[in-house]
Amino acid sequence: MTAESSFVTFVRELFSPLGQISARRMFSGHGLFYERLMFGLVFQEQLYLKVDAQSRPQFEQAGLQPFTYDRRGTVVALSYHRAPDSLFDEPEQARRWGSLALDAALRAQAAKPVKAARRPPRQPPPPPSR
């Protein structure tokens, strides 16, 4: 497993006022998690934060572009937008933008249907006795 970069470590510390932040290697980058909730993405030393319909206008108004990648000739945009540079220098901005991303992740989780608990497979009935 590849160790996280100094940038990922810095970003985890930057968002530490939000709570226990962890990073997990994902594809060519790292996902940023609060508990099991992914609210950020680091790719090629760039930070992207989770957005949804409620928070996206604030990111767009600030001119922050979505994370995109090419999938077989089609550009795909994820629900993560570039973080503003101001959050790297101003702790209050880090809390503000990090909270927006965390709130978007919480809303996305709440919108998912609840999975039913897994049951053990049904056992066939015993054969009739003779």
Image (cartoon, rainbow, N blue to C red):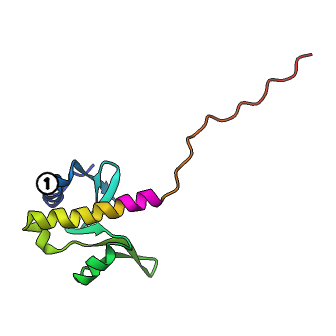
Q: Is residue 61 visible?
A: yes
Query: Looking at the magenta stretch, what is its main secondary structure?
Result: helix
Q: Is residue 65 visible?
A: no
Q: Secondary structure at mark 1?
A: helix
Q: Which amino acid lies under the numbered mark 1 shown in the image of this protein?
A: Glu
Examine the rendered structure and indicate whether residue 8 appears above or below residue 76.
above
Displayed quadrant of residue 48: bottom left
Q: Which one is nearer the viewer's eye here, 45 or 96? A: 96
The residue sitting at the right extreme is: 130
Indicate left or right for 6 with 83 as reference: left
Indicate left or right for 116 with 81 as reference: right
Q: Which one is nearer the viewer's eye here, 110 or 117? A: 110
Indicate left or right for 120 with 86 as reference: right
Q: Position of residue 79 (x, y in %)?
A: 37, 71
Examine the rendered structure and indicate whether residue 1 appears above or below residue 70.
above
Displayed quadrant of residue 106: bottom left
Please tell me whether residue 108 belongs to the stretch shown in magenta. Answer: yes
Tell me what residue is drawn at x 16 percent, y 59 percent: 11
Q: Position of residue 76 (x, y in %)?
A: 41, 77
Tell me what residue is drawn at x 19 percent, y 66 percent: 96
Residue ID for mark 1: 13
Q: Position of residue 107 (x, y in %)?
A: 39, 61
Q: Indicate the quadrant containing the C terminus: top left, top right, bottom left or bottom right.
A: top right
Specify few, some or many for label 1: CA neighbours under 10 Å numbering under 14, 14-19, or 20 or more: some
Q: Which residues are magenta?
A: 106-111
The residue sitting at the top extreme is: 130
Indicate left or right for 91 with 43 as reference: left
Tell me what residue is drawn at x 52 percent, y 56 percent: 113
The residue sitting at the left extreme is: 89
Tell me what residue is drawn at x 32 percent, y 72 percent: 55
